[in-house]
Structures are given as structure tokens and as C-alpha cells.
């Protein structure tokens, strides 16, 4: 792609991100396979899924200020080392008595991962022209989806053949490779705010958000994509419907990889089609694709096909709503506003994951739970219509 050829920093960051995302899925499949092997209840599975996202929620008010104060490369290297240190001890977990260790390590490594992501997304508007920003977000989304597709499929096979411990080891080794690729990058100089206190910068950002209500609405709109938080749901589906048919690790890997196939194809097809006017159509499509998945969920093979359709619009929804927020944010506040955006998005994902567990514990069928998730996108459609009526939006093209 021409943008990657013209932007060496973006190209190197994209390769690093591909490696890091690819690594993450090894641990993801291994963790849920381990939980099912321990025969934990649905609430524990849902709590584990939520713990993947709560760290980003808790640290967001502080991480945004830190991003606007500290040189990005130093932060990136530290965060990647934390991810490595939080991954290797997962190999020590043997039985249910060590759930506390699993929860702690998931919390630490995902805190570093979400911080790294926020940092990178706040860098993009600083190193790219406005016209390239939407394309860069789409590239990032495709990388995530591509690594998700093959990472989940391969990790399912790896966990099935050699076990969870080797999967955790491979995850850590891939992060080591990404760490050494990051070292040579030279980022352009950017204005930092070392002389200003953390509290003053936080107050400035809160005042900025209050003065621009559109920022709040775009943050909330982006958070609706959190209704695609399917990790806990997929693990429960495998345990409830598919365990007699196929090995747990393979089933989890296949379901995620088929959905990710849609995530990869979607932006290629929709990238030039999507616009402010058509965003409502995509929200509605997302809702009905999830309804379809709910209808065929008890059939493994039909569920695989429906997963592709579910993933088709998700990447474009994520990247387009993210780009809208970036376009309406002043440069001096990029780090803080992106951090707040990620906070609300991760909070929605964590709460959805917990809700899935609570509903499952109360004997609500997985089909009904999935229908409820799809209904969230009907609400998003109505909300976006209200935003268009009351605010003038820049076109994210």
C-alpha cells in the first residue's frame, strides 16, 4: 500500500503491531482453554474476559496525561517489557487454586497493552496528514483483523497439539521480537508539557471536553462497538454446544478466526463506501448480522458462517468512529482525548463481558444474550441520528 511505502514510521509500527497482535492470540486461546479445563463456572469466564479491559479503564485518566508529557518511544519500550514480564508467569498456572495469579497477570499485561494502544493511536494524528488518517486507522484495523484471523486459527492448533504452556512461551518470544524492532525507530519531535502538573493537565482536558460536547458524543458513539465483546460468549458457546463435536481449543480458535475473516474483508469492501451519511446503515447491518448469529448458534458449521457476517462491518465501524473523534480533537489534547475514548470503549467491553456472565448464571439462553448484544446497535443507530441532527460533522475521508 502506498501510504506504508511513503511513511517509514507507520510501516515499522504496523509490522510491530502485527507481531504483537499475533502474539496476543496465543495467550487468549490458551487462557480460555485453561479455564474450561479447570471446569470453572460462566461467571469466572466472564470475569476473566472483563479483566482484559478494566485496566485500560482505570489508567486512562492518567495515561493520557503521561502520553502528552513523555517521549513516546521510551514509554513504548517500557510497556512492551511489562507485557513480556506479565506473560511468562502464566506458564506456572496449574489448577483452579491459582486463579488469583491468572487474574493478576491478565490485569497487568492488558494494562500495558491498552496503554501501548492508546499511545500509538495518539501518535497517528501527529505523524500523518489529516487526509491519511482514516486510511491509517483502516490499516491498523486490517492488521488487527488479519492477525486475529491467523493468530486464532494457529493458536487453536498450537494449544491443541502442544498445550497452553508452550502457547504462553511463544507469546512472550514474539513480544521480545517486537521489542527489538521498536528500538531503531526515530519519532519526530513533539511538544511535551513537562512543566505543567498532572492535575493541571487533567483539569485542562476536562474543561476542553465540557466546552466541546461533540467530543463526548463521539466517544460514546465509538463505545457502542464494545457490544461486539464476544470472548466470554464464544467460550460459553463452545462449552455448551460444541464440546462433543470438536476439541475446545480448536473450536474457540475457529470461531474467532472465522469472525476475523469478516473483519479483514469488511474494510477492503467498505473502506471507500463508508461515509457520515452511510454510517447508520452499517450500524443496522451490524445489529441484524448478530441476530442471524443468534438464530444459528446451536449449529457449529452455520455459526462459523454467521461469524464471518458478524465481523464484516465491525472493523469499519471501529475505524470510522475513531477517525471522527480524531478529526474533531485539537492536537494538543490528542493523548488525553484518545485515552478517555479508550477508557469508555474498554469500560463498555468490560461491562458487556460481565453482563454476559450474569445473564448466563441466571439461566438466560446464549441466543437471547446474543440478541441483546445486537439490539445495542439499534440504539447506536438512533443515537447517531441524534448527533447528526444537532452537530455538524467533518467527513472522515
Image: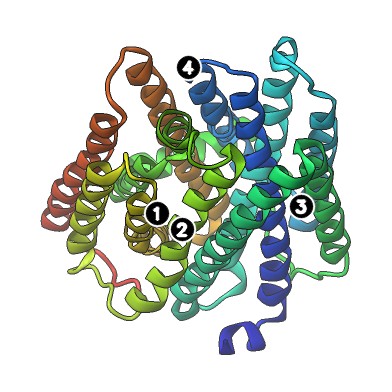
What whole-number distance in Å separates the C-alpha atoms at marks 4 and 2? 25 Å
What whole-number distance in Å separates the C-alpha atoms at marks 1 and 3? 36 Å
What whole-number distance in Å separates the C-alpha atoms at marks 4 and 3? 34 Å
Tell me what residue is drawn at x 84 percent, y 66 percent.
181
Given residues 127 and 283, the one toward you in this image is 283
> Could you tell me which secondary element the residue under label 3 belongs to?
helix
What whole-number distance in Å separates the C-alpha atoms at marks 1 and 2? 6 Å
Residue 144 locus on image (x, y percent): 56, 60
Residue 222, disc = none
Q: Give the mark, 1 or 3, whose residue is nearer the N terminus.
A: 3
According to the picture, the residue beneath numbered tag 2 turns out to be 258
What whole-number distance in Å separates the C-alpha atoms at marks 3 and 2? 31 Å
According to the picture, the residue beneath numbered tag 4 turns out to be 43
Given residues 323 and 26, the one toward you in this image is 26
> Could you tell me which secondary element the residue under label 4 belongs to?
helix
According to the picture, the residue beneath numbered tag 1 turns out to be 304
Q: Give the mark, 1 or 2, whose residue is nearer the N terminus.
A: 2
According to the picture, the residue beneath numbered tag 3 turns out to be 76
The answer to the question of whether label 1 and label 2 lie on touching residues, with beta carbons closer than 8 A, is yes
Q: Is residue 158 left or right of residue 35?
A: right
Amino acid at each position: 500500500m502506498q501510504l506504508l511505502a511513503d511513511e517509514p514510521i507507520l510501516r515499522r509500527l504496523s509490522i510491530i503491531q502485527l507481531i504483537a497482535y499475533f502474539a496476543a492470540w496465543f495467550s487468549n486461546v490458551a487462557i480460555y482453554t485453561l479455564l474450561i479445563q479447570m471446569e470453572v463456572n460462566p461467571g469466572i469466564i466472564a470475569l476473566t474476559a472483563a479483566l482484559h479491559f478494566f485496566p485500560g479503564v482505570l489508567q486512562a485518566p492518567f495515561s493520557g496525561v503521561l502520553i502528552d508529557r513523555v517521549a513516546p518511544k521510551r514509554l513504548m519500550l517500557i510497556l512492551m517489557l511489562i507485557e513480556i514480564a506479565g506473560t511468562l508467569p502464566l506458564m506456572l498456572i496449574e489448577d483452579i487454586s491459582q486463579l488469583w495469579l491468572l487474574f493478576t497477570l491478565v490485569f497487568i499485561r492488558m494494562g500495558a497493552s491498552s496503554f501501548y494502544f492508546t499511545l500509538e493511536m495518539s501518535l497517528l494524528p501527529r505523524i500523518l496528514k489529516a487526509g491519511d488518517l482514516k486510511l491509517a486507522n483502516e490499516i491498523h484495523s486490517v492488521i488487527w483483523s488479519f492477525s486475529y484471523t491467523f493468530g486464532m486459527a494457529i493458536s487453536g492448533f498450537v494449544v491443541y497439539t502442544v498445550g497452553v504452556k508452550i502457547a504462553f512461551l511463544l507469546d512472550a518470544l514474539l513480544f521480545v521480537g517486537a521489542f527489538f524492532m521498536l528500538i531503531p525507530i526515530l519519532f519526530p519531535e513533539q511538544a511535551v508539557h513537562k512543566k505543567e502538573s498532572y492535575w493541571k493537565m487533567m483539569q485542562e482536558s476536562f474543561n476542553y471536553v465540557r466546552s466541546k460536547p461533540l467530543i463526548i458524543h463521539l466517544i460514546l458513539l465509538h463505545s457502542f462497538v464494545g457490544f461486539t465483546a464476544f470472548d466470554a460468549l464464544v467460550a460459553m458457546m463452545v462449552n455448551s454446544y460444541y464440546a462433543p463435536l470438536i476439541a475446545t481449543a480448536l473450536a474457540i480458535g475457529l470461531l474467532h478466526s472465522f469472525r476475523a475473516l469478516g473483519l479483514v474483508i469488511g474494510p477492503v469492501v467498505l473502506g471507500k463506501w463508508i461515509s457520515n451519511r452511510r454510517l447508520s446503515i452499517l450500524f443496522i447491518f451490524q445489529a441484524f448480522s448478530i441476530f442471524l448469529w443468534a438464530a444459528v448458534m446451536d449449529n457449529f458449521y452455520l455459526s462459523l458462517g454467521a461469524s464471518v457476517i458478524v465481523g464484516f462491518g465491525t472493523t469499519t465501524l471501529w475505524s470510522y468512529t475513531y477517525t471522527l473523534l480524531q478529526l474533531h480533537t485539537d492536537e494538543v489534547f490528542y493523548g488525553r482525548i484518545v485515552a478517555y475514548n479508550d477508557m469508555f470503549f474498554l469500560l463498555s467491553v468490560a461491562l458487556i463481558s460481565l453482563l454476559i456472565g450474569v445473564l448466563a448464571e441466571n439461566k438466560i439462553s446464549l441466543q437471547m444474550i446474543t440478541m441483546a448484544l445486537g439490539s445495542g446497535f439499534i440504539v447506536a443507530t438512533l443515537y447517531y441520528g441524534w448527533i447528526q441532527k444537532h452537530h455538524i460533522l467533518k467527513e472522515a475521508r
